[in-house]
Amino acid sequence: MSALRTFGWSFGVTTVALAAALLFWGPGGLATVAVLGVLEVSLSFDNAVINATVLRRMSGFWQRMFLTVGILIAVFGMRLVLPLLVVSATTRLGPGAVLDLAVNDPGSYAEHLDHAHPAIAAFGGMFLLMIALDFLLAEREVHWLPPVERTLARAGRLDRLAVLLAVGALVTAATTLAGSAQSTVLISGLLGLFTYLAVGGLSQYFEGHGVAVGDGRPRSATVGRAAFFLFLYLEVLDASFSFDGVVGAFAISQNIFQIALGLGIGAMFIRSLTVHLVRRGTLDDYVYLEHGAHYAIGALAVILFLTIRYEVPEVVTGGIGVALILASFLSSLARNRRERDDRAVAAPETDARLTTENEPMPR
């Protein structure tokens, strides 16, 4: 029943979206929207895991906000309005003219959006790379790949190493271009870096200074301004994931409303899956999932930088992420099995010791 309650919104939205697709575009449109939804889910599972690492720090109210208000922002904001604004900014056309172009000349709209891809990739790649580096360069008790992660943690003691590495990657990607394209990529990437530092920094500040009303103790779940900035952080993270998917969706359909419906279905299921992971405590049960997701985020960031200059198939992007998540999940299963075996071996020894200690002393 709990799972049904969590995924109920997703099934409801899917039903309405597919019914609308059938009504407006017939069986072919329904099939297109369904394919786009399935692809969005399959390519964004690592997004759900990363979201869950943030969402579990938030109160129940903000988790519901993420699942309700957040999905409206994700579907209409990130996957419909934001691409229009990006094309408007890069073509210097008004938003109304861009919307008219998207509806009446989707081929030209797709070309403009593809032309804006280097700036999109630089922003999203920088934001995602900072997430991955901040995780991988931090000291932590649990290691999935101990030699690699311990080495990275030692290197992470250098102040601002993550920023230096991210800027170095951005500059390297920008040097593959020339003229105005190079400066556009640099500005977009630095804007992505600033967004990450600003939103993440404000959230950490308010989270660190927040106390529950009346008792003076730290909050058990993030609320108030800290939760608001975490909410913004999740929305920017979703945008960084979704940009590339929006561009790639034009290979399946050039109808922006079909794309919005299909990607919206996927986004809804990713949000429900995120909440499900939090409520089931999956990240605590499978401790390497968080590691695998951050490796996948780092891989996606590198791929986004590569796509500034080169063509990278969507199947490669999604395949790497799925492979890393699956590997971390299987490693977590193996770890849990080893711990159960160790406890099973230790239990008889403990029982025998307790029995010996409780035996009466010989007279």
Image (cartoon, rainbow, N blue to C red):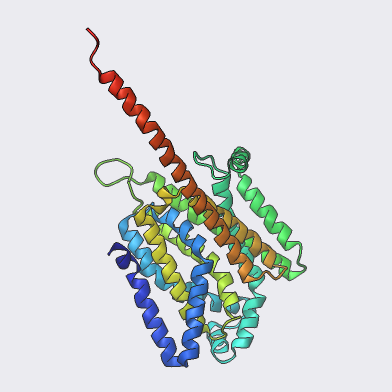
Marker count (numbered): 0
> Does the image show residue 301?
yes
Q: Quadrant of residue 193?
A: bottom right
Residue 7, image x and y in percent? 35, 68
Specify the quadrant that holds the C terminus: top left
> In this view, which residue lies farthest toward the front?
362
Name the residue rendered at 40%, 87% in the picture: 20
Q: Is residue 21 above or below residue 47?
A: below
Asked if residue 239 lies left or right of residue 68, the reply is right
Q: Is residue 85 above or below residue 279?
A: below
Q: Quadrant of residue 118?
A: bottom right
Residue 234, image x and y in percent? 46, 61
Q: Is residue 274 above or below residue 209?
A: below
Residue 285, image x and y in percent? 41, 49
Asked if residue 81 lies left or right of residue 276, the reply is right
Specify the quadrant that holds the N terminus: bottom left
Q: Nearer the viewer, residue 16 or 342?
A: 342
> Does the image show residue 257?
no
Residue 262, image x and y in percent? 48, 78
Name the residue rendered at 40%, 73% in the picture: 72
Name the residue rendered at 53%, 39% in the picture: 139
Q: Is residue 315 above or below residue 254?
A: above
Asked if residue 87 lies left or right of residue 23, the reply is right
